Amino acid sequence: MGARQKYRLRARSDREVIREVEPGKTYVDRESGEEFEVVSKLLPLAPSPSELPWSVENLRLCGCSLEQLAPKDLNDCPHCGRRLPAIER
Ligand SMILES: [Zn+2]
């Protein structure tokens, strides 16, 4: 975990996601249908899978039965592996 390069992607409506990207693949916002553009590359930090400090504004409940806090920049819950929903802004 945390070994793959992640990128910040932004749609026209300023919605952002942080994820790994594959070259040549197009990423579309599931809600707005807008295409994401890669705006920056995140530095990989080990050993945490998250690039965010462990503070309350960077955490959210993953929603699984474990009711664990998950960093907001993760796509998957680090506790149960459940896919996390896109963050509302
Ligand atoms: Zn979970």
Image (tube, rainbow, N blue to C red):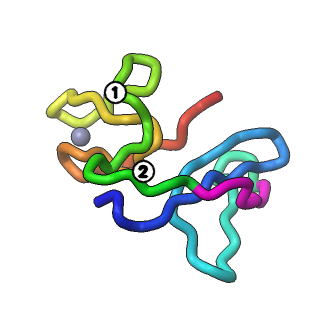
Q: Main secondary structure of the magenta part?
A: strand
Residue in the image at 68% along x and 82% along y = 24
- Is 39 placed above or below 68 here? below
Q: Is residue 53 left or right of residue 77?
A: right
Residue that sits furthest to the bottom in the current view? 24
Q: Earlier in the sequence, mark 2 or mark 1?
A: 1
Q: Is residue 49 left or right of residue 13?
A: left
Q: Disc 2 versus disc 1: distance between alpha carbons?
A: 16 Å
Q: Which residue is mark 2?
A: 75
Residue in the image at 37% along x and 20% along y = 55
Callout count: 2
What stretch of residues is rendered in magenta? 34-41
Residue in the image at 70% along x and 72% along y = 26
Circle 2 — which element?
loop
**Magenta-span inclusion, residue 3:** no
Residue 51 at what x, y percent from top left? 43, 43
Q: Which residue is mark 1?
A: 54
Type of residue at label 2?
Asn
Type of residue at label 1?
Trp
**Foreground disc of the pair 2, 1:** 1
- Is 27 placed above or below 63 here? below
Residue 9 at what x, y percent from top left? 67, 54
